Each structure stands twice: as C-alpha cells, then as structure tokens.
Amino acid sequence: MRQTPSDTQSIDADVPSHLYAPAGQVVSADASSELSRRQFLEAAGFTISLAAIGGCGRAPVQHALPPPKLPVGMIPGQLRYYASTCAGCPASCGLLVGTRDGRPLKMEGLPEHPLSRGGLCAVGQALPIGLYDSQRLVSPLRAGQPAEWVVIDQEIAQSLAQFKGQQKMVRLVSSTVTSPTLQAGIDSFLKQFADGEHVVFDAVSCAAILDAHAATHSVRVLPHYRFERAATVVSFEADFLGTWISPVEFTAAWSTRRNPQPGMPEMSYHVQFESRMSLTGSNADRRYAIHPQEQGPLVGRLTELVAARVGAPLSARLAPAIDIDQERVLANLVERLWQTRGQSLVISDSQDTGVQRCVNYINHLLGNYDHTLELARYSRQRQGNDRDVEQLVEDLTSDRVGALLVTDVDLLHALANCDGMADAIDRIPVTISCAPRVDEFASHAKYVCPDHHALESWYDAEPIASLVSLGQPTLAPLGNTRSVLESLAAWSGQPTDVGAAIRLHWKSVVFPRRLAQATASFAEFWDNALRDGFVEVEPEPVNIREFASTSIRPLIHPAATNAFSLVLYANVGMPDARHAHNPWLQELPDPVTKITWGNCVSISSGDAERLGIQDGDVVSVSAGRDGPRLELPAFIQVGQHEGSLAIALAYGCKGTDRFAKIGPQWFQAEPTVPELGLVGVNAASFLEFRNGTLRYQRSGVTLAKTGTHRELAATQQHNSLELPADVAPFGAERREIVQFTTLAAFAKDVHAGAPEQHHASEPQLWPEDHSKTGHAWGMVIDLNKCTGCSACVIACQSENNVPVVGYDEVRRQREMHWLRIDRYYTTAFQDISVLHQPMMCQHCDNAPCETVCPVLATVHSSEGLNEQIYNRCVGTRYCANNCPFKVRRFNWFEYPRNDSLKNLVLNPEVTVRSRGVMEKCSMCVQRIEAARIVARTQGQPIADGAIQTACQQSCPANAIVFGDMNDPTSGIHAARENPRIFRVLEELNVRPSVSYLRVVRNRGEEALRG
Amino acid sequence: MSDRILLAKFGHEDDLLASTIELRSKGYKIVDAFTPYAVHGLDRALGLKPSRLTWVCFVCGMIGALGMLYFEYWVGAISWPLDVGGKPWNSLPSNVPVAFETAVLLAGFGSVIALLGVSKLYFGKQPQPLFERVTDDRFVLVLDEADARFDPAQVEVILRPFNLLELEERVVAGGVRQ
Amino acid sequence: MVEVRQQRKPKPSPVRVREAWENLRPTLITGDKQPADVTRDICAPLDRRPTALWWWAFLVAFTALVVGATAVTYQIAVGIGTWGLNRTVGWAFDITNFVFWVGIGHAGTLISAVLFLFRQKWRTSVNRSAEAMTLFAVVCAGLFPVIHMGRPWLAFWMAPYPNTRGPLWVNFKSPLLWDVFAISTYLLISAVFWYVGLIPDLATIRDRSQSVWRRRLAGIFSLGWNGSAKTWHRYETVYLLLAGLATPLVFSVHTIVSMDFATAVIPGWHTTIFPPYFVAGAIFSGLAMVLTLMIIARKVMRLEDYITVRHVEAMCKLMLSMGCIVGLAYGTEFFIAAYSGNSYEQFLFINRALGPFRWAYWTMVSCNVLIPQLLWLRAVRRNIILVFLISIVVNIGMWFERFVIIVTSLHRDFLPSSWASYQPTIIEVATLLGSFGLFFSCFLLFCRFIPVIAMAEVKGVLRAPHHPQEQDALQGDAA
C-alpha cells in the first residue's frame, strides 16, 4: 500500500516532528554491531511517519522515542511502500521503497514513473545492503580520527573564510548533480568565494556528447534519447541497455518496440558496432565487431553516405576509406535509416567530440531531433565536463587550489591516470570528502564528512529537464552522518535541514514551473509529488540554435598500430566505484562474461590463440615503457574484435579487501580477494585526456603473459547452444534450449523457430489425479524483450534472502542465486549471436525432483507450485541431481550471517536457510500468500496483477508475466496464447509452469544455419 | 519312556545311518541321534516328518507384503495425500519394492525365531544332554530301553558290523528331551 | 573288525563302495582330512596368538579407518561443502562408494545362498568368510547414504514412524526410500543367515576351546546346541528357507539400488537395463573381492587344504561370466543410445567415451571387460598370483563403473549453461580410504575370533557326496 496525502496529514498531526532523531549513536563500525533489532526498530519504527512529514524542521534530539500511537494505516510487520527516487546513479529512476517496521527492505521500480516505467536495475535493487553496511562511517573524521560535527564545522568554516577574499581556488568536485536543490546549494556555497567553481566529474563521462551539442546546437546539454520512438537504432559502442546514461529507461523504451505480433510482424531494427561484447551488442539484431579505432572512420563514412542520400553531399571526405564489407554494411544501413528518417536514432559512446558532431549531423540530417532525441526536454543525467576536470588536475598539481571538496566520486581512484595527485592533494590546505566510507581520496582528505545513505535522507532529482522527482528518507540515519546539502549550508554559516531546504527550493523554484493543469496550492503540489515520487513540470527554456553544419570537420584519425587497443567500460553490475562495497553487486554475474568478484581482461579468441593464453591466465597489460601497467586474469570473450582488449572500470577500490573472508571458511577455501588484496584491479590508470575529453580507449597497449593463473569465478562453464564439436552427436549439434527465429521467418510463419516435433500432447503414464481447479500459478518470459540485464537476479536475492557465497564457492559452481540468466552464444546466424534466458524453478507439474525426495521435503501445491520445505529437507541432493534445469541450490555450508546490522536486510517473510538444505525459486510464494490474505479480508478473489513476483516487478523490459493460468481474463492467459510460446525441454513432458516467448531477431534470412 | 537309555557311538556318518536303518527295521525305538554336522538322509532314516517351519515362513512373508502394501496405500492416499511429481495418490508400482523387502524381512526373522522356539534354543542355554566329542567327530545314537525285552547285548551284536566304537548305558533323569 | 566284515559277507560294507565312488570325482578338501582334523585345523588359529602378519594388516586397516573417521567428522562439523560436489554434480564419491560396497556384499550372498540352492558343495569352504564379507560390506555401504546427507543427524526421518508433525510420513515413491528398506533388510537378513550358520561351530568351540572366556562366550551364543538330529532337521529346513529368501533379496537389493538411477530423468541414468546390469556388476565385483580375501586368507590362515585351487578356479569361471555380462551391458547402452534416437542419450554416451571423463570410462572398460578375458586360460585361472592381481583390477574397475555412471551422467546434462566438472577433495578420498579401513578391520577381527570356515558344513563334504544306503548296496553288487 502506498501512503496518501490523507495519511500524511494525520501522521503529521500524530507525530510531532521533533520526535524524529538520529539513532546513529547506537551503531558501531565493527561487524558485530551491538545494535539489537529491538533497539533498532524502536529507533526506526516511527520514522515511517517522517516519510510522510513534508519538510518539517528537524531540531536535534539526542534520543529516540517510539511513537505514542501508531501512524494511521501503519500495521506492524506489514510492508509499506513509499515512492522515492533511486540514487544509485544519476539516471534517477523512480523507486518504490518497501519498508517493514521502519526498515527499508525491498527496492522496487515505480510503475508510474515516465522514464523507468516500473523497472529498476540491479544497482538500485541492491541499495539496502549498502544501507546496512556496518563499515559505513558513523561519524565525521578529522585527520582520520572521529570528531564532533561542531568541531569540524568550526574548523572548516574558519579555514574556508580565508578564501573569501584571496585568489585561492575553492573547488567542489562531484559527479553529475541531478538534484536542483543540491545544485542551488552548491552554487550559493561557492558564490561566497572569490574563485569558487563546481567541477562535475563523471567517472564514466559523456562529455563529448555535450561538447558536440555545444558546437552543433550551441547548448551544452545531453539530449534525451527516446528509444520507444526509434524504428532504427544504430549504436557505435554505446551500451545503452547496460550502462550508458540511463539503461533502465532505455531498456524500457527499447523493449516496447521488440514485440512482433502475428498480425503485424514489426519491430525495431537495432545495429551495434562495437569492439567488445556489450550487453547491448548481445541483444542487437545485427552486431558488427569493429576495431575501436575504426569507429571514427565508420561514423565519418556514415555521415558522408547519409549526407549524400539526403542530397546535401559533403565537400570533403571526413575520414579515411573503410574496407569494402563495411562499405556494403553502411550502404544498406543508410537505406534503412533513410526509410525510417525521423524515427531513427544514431548514437555513439565516443569521447571524440568530432565523432559526436558527426553523429549529431546524421541525426540532424535524418530529422531525428525532437523525435528520437529531445533537446528542449534535455537530459541532466550526465553533466560531466572533462575540460574542467583536466583543468582541475592541472590546478591541483600546480598548487593553485586552496580548498577541495569532493562528493559522490573518488577523485583519486577515478583519476588514477594522473600522477602526483595524491601528493598534490596532501599539500592542499583544506580537503573535504563527503564519502560514506574512507575511499582513496577520503584517506588523504583532512576532513571526511560522511553523507547520509540515500535511504536515510531527503533528496530530489531532475533527470530530465521537465521531470522533477523526490527522494524521501525511510529510516533515521544509522550513523551520525549529515547530508552534503546540510554540510555546505553549515559551512556557509546558515545551517539548514535538507528536508526544509528541498521543500523551500521546490516552493520557490519548482512550484512556479508547474504545468497549467496542476494544483494551485503548494501543499497539495508537494503532497502529490511526495505520494507519486515525481512531478512533471515545464522545462526551463533553452535556446537551441539552428544546426551549425560548419562544425562538421574531418575527423582526426590516429595512425593504426599493430599493438592492442584497450577499451575501458563500466560493468552492468558495477557502474561506478561507489558500489564496490556491495557484496550483492560484486557477486552478480556479469550479464555477458558471467564472471563475478572482480574484473578481467577480455581478449579475442584469435589473439588468445596467437599468444597461447587460456581463461584465467594472469596477463600484464601496459601502455608504453613508463606508461600504466596492470595485471589481471585474461578472459577469452566471444565476439571481441581481434586486436582489442576490454577491462571494466570501478574495480580495485580501497577497502574491498574486507571481502577476503566473505565466503565459508574451511581449510581448502580460497580467499575472495587475490593476493593483491582488493576485489579486481583499478584500470583507470589507462585513462587519458585528449582534446578536452577523458578517453576510455587507449591504443598502443601491449599484453604479456605473467605465467601465473587465477581461476575466474564464472557461473557458466559452457557458453554455447552448440555442443562441443568432439562429442556432439551427428544431427544434434545444437540444443533447442532457447528457441529463436528471424523476423522474416516469423512474418511467413508465426511458429517459425519451433522444433520439428511437438511433444506437448504426450499421453500421461498415469491418471490425472491432480487437476488444478483453483489457481494455477504460472509465468511467461518474453525472451525477445529480456536483455539479460540481471536486475531480476538481485531482486530475487533481496526478496528471498539469498546468501552471498564469495569467490571460492562461485568458482566451485556453488553460487546460490535462485534466478540465474543463462547466456548462450550460437552460430545459427552468419555472425555470432547471443541469447539470454532467465532460468529459475520451472514448477513442473510432473516434477522429477518431487518423486525422488525420500522425506517429502519437496511436494506440489494444489495451485501448481513446486514447494520446498526447508525444515523437512535432510539434504540428499537427489532432487537437484534429478532436476533437468539444474535450478536447485544447496546450502553447502552455514553461510556467514554474523553481522547483526547486515542481517537487517533480511526479509522476515522468507526463511533463512540453514546448512544442508536444498532451496530454490518459490515463485515468491510469500507474495502470493500476502495477496491472498488481502483478497480474503476484502472478500474478493485475487485480482490479476495483485501478485507480482520480485523478478517481474523489477524487470526494466517488462518481459515477465506472472499470474493465474486458469483465469481466462489474466495477462498470463493472454501471453500463453502468443504463437511464440515454448517450454524448455518440452520433450521430457515434465510440464513446466514457466513458459518462454521465442526470440525474434529483425533479420532478412529465413532459415537458420545448422 | 524310562530313564535308562543306551548310547551307541560311531566314528562315521555312514555307520550311523546304516545302523539307524538296521535298528528301526528291527523295531527298536530310537530316541534321537547326535551328530557334528547335518547327516543327509538321517531324517528319513529316523522317520522325521518334514518340518512345518516353511509355513511359518510363508505366513510371515505374506503378512509383511500385504501389511506394507496397505500401509503404503494408507499413507499415500488416505493419511496425508500429497501431490508428488504428479503421480497418482496410490501408485502401486512404486509401492512394490518396499513391500517386497518387508516380506523378506519378516519371513526370514519369523522362521528363525520359530526355529529357536521349536528347538528350544535360547541364549546362554546349557546343552542338555551333551555327549562328548559330538560337536567334533562323534556320532551318537540314543536308544530307549523302555520295554522289558530290551537286551543291550543283542543291540551290540546288531551294531558291531557297523564299526561300533562304544556302547554305553546311562540313566538320564526324564530321559533325553526331545 | 576286519574279520567281522568277512563274517557278514552278504552284507556289503558301504566303505568300499564309497572308495569306488571316490575315484569318479576329485575331492573338495585335500589332505585326506578327518572331521577331527577339520575341527583342529579351523579352531587352531583361534587359540593361537595372532601372527605378526595379522598385526601389521590390522594396524594398516585401523589407521585407514581412523583417517576416514577424522575426515567424516570434519565434514559433518563443517559441511558437505568440504566435498568437491557442486550445483550440477550433487553426487560423486559418496554414492559411488555406496553402490560399490553394496555390490561387494552381493557375492557373499550369492556364494552362501545361491550356490547352496544349487547344491554347489565347494561353497562350504568359502561361504563363512563370504557371508562375513557381505556383512561388513553392507555396513560400509550403509554409512554413505547417511553421511552424504546435508543434515545426517536427521537420517532417522527416513523411517516412517508416527510423529508429532501430524501425519507426516515418508515418500514411498522415492527410490532412495526403497534403498533404505532394501539395505536395512539386506543387512539384517545377511546377519541372521550368517549367525544361524555359525551356531553349530560355536557349539564346537564351546566344547573344545582352551580359553575359558571364549568357551563361555561361545556357550552363550551357541544357544545350547547339542547336535540333536531333530534340531539338525529343522535347522536344515530354516537354512534352506533363508537361502531361498536371501537369493531374491540380493537381486532385489541391487535392482533397487539401480533404480536410484534408472527412475531418474537424467540421460545415462534413465535406463531400463540397469537392474540386470547392476546385479551382474555387483556379483562381478563381489566375486573379485571374495577372491582377494580368500587368497589372502588361505595364505595367512594356512588354509590351502580347504580353499584349494579348485575353489579359486570355480570362482574365476563365475567371475569371467559376470565380466562378460557387464561387458555386454556396456555395449548395449551404446547401442540403445544410438538406436533410440534420443539426442541427449547419444550425446551422453559419446561424452562418456570421449569427453572430459574419458580416462575414467576407459579405466572401467579395460579393468572390467578386457583384462578379465585372461581368465579364459586355465593356466591363468590356476595361477593364484595372477588371479589375485586380476581380482584387484576388477575391484578397481567396478568402483570406476559406478563413478562413471554417476559423475559423467550428471556433469553434462540437459542445459549446457549448467554443465560443470567435478574434482574430489582430500576429505572425499580420505572417506573412501576410511571405508576400506573399516571393512578390513572388521574382516581381520572376524578371522581372529570366528572360525573362518564353516566346520559343520565342511565335515559334511569331506568325502564325495553321500548316497543313501540302498543305492550303495546296488552299486556294491555291481562292483
């Protein structure tokens, strides 16, 4: 249930706001925190009401009291949802915070949110475990020692005061700030100083795009990409389904056009040019592996061709010639783009402004602006300005900076390429970090003023110029932390409360921008925003000039070398270093490589063969003799272009050695962190500034074997639908686990892609004793929408208390995820193509696992669920052996749960399994029962859609449908009518309750190879 | 029968057998024979009826099989019917193995217990009577001297051809327990 | 005496006839033993002090047992994770050892019961030790299903006992539960069978042993046996009944064990030929183990006269035939896979022979099928050393058979995404070692304290099979 304004009022009345107090004092930093659950709930219980209290002032109170009487509508032990905004990354997706007894437990997508549309990525799902992290700072540090805020504030205020007059620089470095209030706060803070500037530094920046628009449209903004309007998507290396700018939003939009219907076999056409295998590339209709250095020429050539096609040929060649195959590819592509002009979209992740200008030009020529790209309602999700950063580095190293404030980003970790930074920072008189943990910069900063966790604090965001959203606290801060906004206010001498500040800012700035039809009362406006989590307003006017064609100049093309080109990218599960301390994300298998716990060097099979490198061989990567150098295990990546390497950023973060003993400890167990002492290695040292942007590509990189070996903890060993050639039986070289076809074939026959013989109608050996007359729960997963983004994996983990087991256990193929995503490569098409398949318990009607359990620990419910009874299980593992889908997970050890604070993340609705029992997907039976209770109390049948499984709720692509298969009006009933439907291993006649919809790739060929 | 018995000791099973046949043909009453191992044909020679233990075995076996079959049916279909892998409540085929094993178990134990009972064998029992070397290599034939016209001398004459080792008269209170 | 016989000319002496018969058939027991000699020879080792050889053997076996016990303790204390298993390969060493030991047990029953029914008199010299072997093997086997559980302390939940959890029984549809009943029945019946056979010999010990306490113990357990013909008569009946019961039992037990796999859906397990295939394999491995033990025993206990080359040869013939059946089964599996057109099945068997575990597969084939073919040669069969070596090889091969069936079937099943490999940990190896330790410790103790040869039965076959008097008479006339 979501709270309503009426609640708000009454709660407002019930609970005097001054009762709200930080319960932080009781949190201690060590793992065995003495914070008892009871204490904690007392402290946190009534802060739910705070969630409803709009911006009342918060006077400091030293102790917390339970509410004199419960807020209206609050039932102890019952889950309550609050609309909020995800602070996992600047994309600022809509968030539903599920809290129980004052504990935020479950992050879900906000269905009404116009951008994320109910989706939420893995990072957002994993927020709570960051909140209950016993190693977060619980009080400010001064020279590394805990100190009182008052002391620190005084010192800082004094030392800052000296810069008001003199020409010493004051620099505030942050990653993209989408919060209008915080932005205002920063601006007013910096205004005091003679030379105060705000440097926006995105660890993975899109500065080139903004710069390019500054050149072509004379506004330095990031366009808002509208994939739902794009019939043709051409992406150069941009991983927009995985990590690029706003992946959840883009996935949601993109998937709306991936739904070919029998009547009209239409779907968007998505082409990906990339050197590494990205999640986006793995979902593209056509993926062309290119050398990183070819991107420029390709974009240039495409520009020329488009210009020619449009009839405004360019005077000069933009780039050197490309080879003939690529010419042919581009020729076809241009045709398609032209056919779909106005609803096509060309994007690139290049940090070369020239390339981005060309991209803009293509989109301009095709008339995509204001259709698939919006500048008027531009995106504020990436504002990074690498020129400023470069300047900052220079200022720092030349000691021109007097005070340096850093928030949201670990300057030293992210700029590991700049030498002498650490010393320079040590020389700065005033250095302040707002990091929640002592990261690399914080360890050098004089003062560490830890920010709240997003779930503890008010905040707001304006991801898109016309969309403002609110984030509300869902419990009292666990530590003696303080929001950045408050700190800045305190240091500029007018202390405020973040809630108040936001409400104030909204009243003065946001409210005036309200839409015409919006309410006239600010209180109502605010309450609505608070209830909905967001509000749409008029965009601030930007004056976009006519496209400046003059800005299109020939591209600078680096001389081709025979050395490797290195591509640095962000992992889907680890977008930036702030999440490095999140065990859920560390153990989330990368959607493409399926590797957990650390990064690796992706290398093409050809190069690996040439250099005699096997998976897991530690290689040393270096750029030049005195250039950066690192050692990482190699991973042979299918689809990686020869001559290119890829390494994920945001690893090797300070403090991740804490995970050394995260797994079960026994005498043959290997520690989760390698000898190096950190999870992964920081590859940022390979970054370089070139022409005003931070480059994530580095040419002239050499690779050498070190002779050592570190096995990669990958959750998938065999990666292809094709069986190993040496043991494949003749005529059955490929297994039809994932069925797929092409749009052309689908247009001819909607059943295309189905195996020859159907086994569905096999007669039963025995009489049908168990007809499901009541509900029959089932699930349908549309593999054509599913991108494999793995949000569901974390959603399931957080909903079902799935333990984290650590590197060694994953390496031993004992990961515990109930829901995994199988990723298969197949050579059925000419080029390699990738298929993702979420795989969880299929709840078979003829379940092989049930028959073999000697103690009836797994049986079938009358509603078609395959139930696992943990306390009856004796752990023979026979069921797991006999499961054709291998979805059962066994508790090999008693997994460590001794961190009493971290245990607060556990969902009380779901049993925590002990050692020696089997477990698996329960189709969120606790949610089914909850819905049943509600329905009973209301005396109505369970409505379709009243039950949403955790995975379904969070799916950004909306690919999962769950419901009652017996209900003819239900969504799943309709979904099962879809001709693309199939069930895995149908021939076994185990009758799964989970069905899949066939993959359709928008391609011309009508027959598949092999 | 009287307390007076006559023991004829032999060194070989064949002599024992032959003399048994001989004596019985002459109408002598043989109480029992004691041998170190099962002498084949001795039962026929002594005119013992086939044992009824086979029936005990059969009955126990049937009890085991049918009892278990019913129990399995009751558990699966009546006591707590559970949907296991879509199998019918009462799936007879899957009930057979356990029923069979139980049958064998009861049959085996039944007949052995019956044996001990009938032969009055129990733990710590003192062997009664026990003739020396009878568990080693001696074969002893026990005759009852019930009727008046019993003449040990004559018996000796009859038995001598069969390598009779020794003839001994003994008084056993209550005679040899059968 | 002689003149007596002359006196009674018309009455032919059975003795001479017997000699005539003797020439027709070689004796089972060499050295022209008399019953008294048997008693002496068999009981002698019991009264003698154990030999140095025995002590060394026992020391080794017991050490192994201790090692294994330590490993199991650690595993139960820490978790099954200390084994090399994973989400895909849920069974490996544990169930391999289980099936292996059950198999070993079966030959014991075969020799003591089946050969008894077939009136194979040569069995008498070996059946006692064979039955003991069965007993200990089944004990070893029984351990593994218990320790392989995630929560072994709850093993009693396998029993259908009335409980406080409402009518919560067990799943009679699960082959694992059939196992529970099969194995426990098998253990109990074998124990009873063994003990019943032991009663007369215990009586012998009671009546002749020097040591007082052994006499007393034997006295208690010999149940007051006095060799009465009437008791013998019933005894024979019951012994026959037990043999009759044990025979189908032994087949049912391994059939059920094979159903653990045959009733599963996993390719390579889901096979209808498993029951006969497993039974043959079981007897095969069991015979090999019997040979191993017999050959050791006859040397260590100086029983060459009782366990003669003839016995060894007979066992070899049996073993050879079983080996051929097993070989046939291996072939059939491949044929069925090819013939069925089930691509999962086909893949599995190709993968078995050529995949990552091919080394295990070919070890199995060479140990179980190729090498035993040597036994076609009489010379080999009569060469104790060679036979000993072959029996060892077969034991190894049969262990690998179970390993191959379990691991290669599991590690690459339906969904390629879940394929995984398997590698045993030290703990698992130590556990296997420990089971051997347990087995041999028990067996050595048995050799020490219980007559290794069924005296009462051997005495019965010292000479040629006996025939009723009247037939003797006829032949006597003929002669």
Image: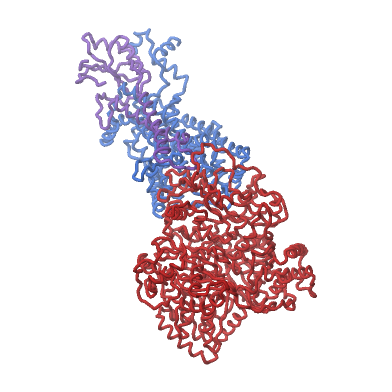
Chain colours: A red, B purple, C blue
Q: Nearer the viewer, residue C86 or C447?
A: C86
Q: Quadrant of residue A13?
A: bottom left
Give residue C118's position: percent from left, percent from top.
Answer: 45, 25
Give residue C100's position: percent from left, percent from top.
Answer: 47, 41
- Residue A799 can be seen in this image: yes
Residue at 37% over, 33% down: C194
Numbered disc total: 0
Residue A246 sits above or below residue C88 on the image? below
Residue C207 appears left or right of A900: left
Which residue reaches farthest bottom? A165
Give residue A700's position: percent from left, percent from top.
Answer: 67, 72
Residue B92 appears left or right of A956: left
Residue C220 sits above or below residue C67 on the image? above
Residue A258 appears left or right of A864: right
Q: Nearer the viewer, residue A38 or B110?
A: A38
Q: Nearer the viewer, residue A275 or A356?
A: A356
Give residue C82's position: percent from left, percent from top.
Answer: 45, 54
Residue C320 sits above or below residue B42 on the image? below
- Residue C458 can be seen in this image: no
Q: Quadrant of residue A401?
A: bottom right
Q: Quadrant of residue B11?
A: top left
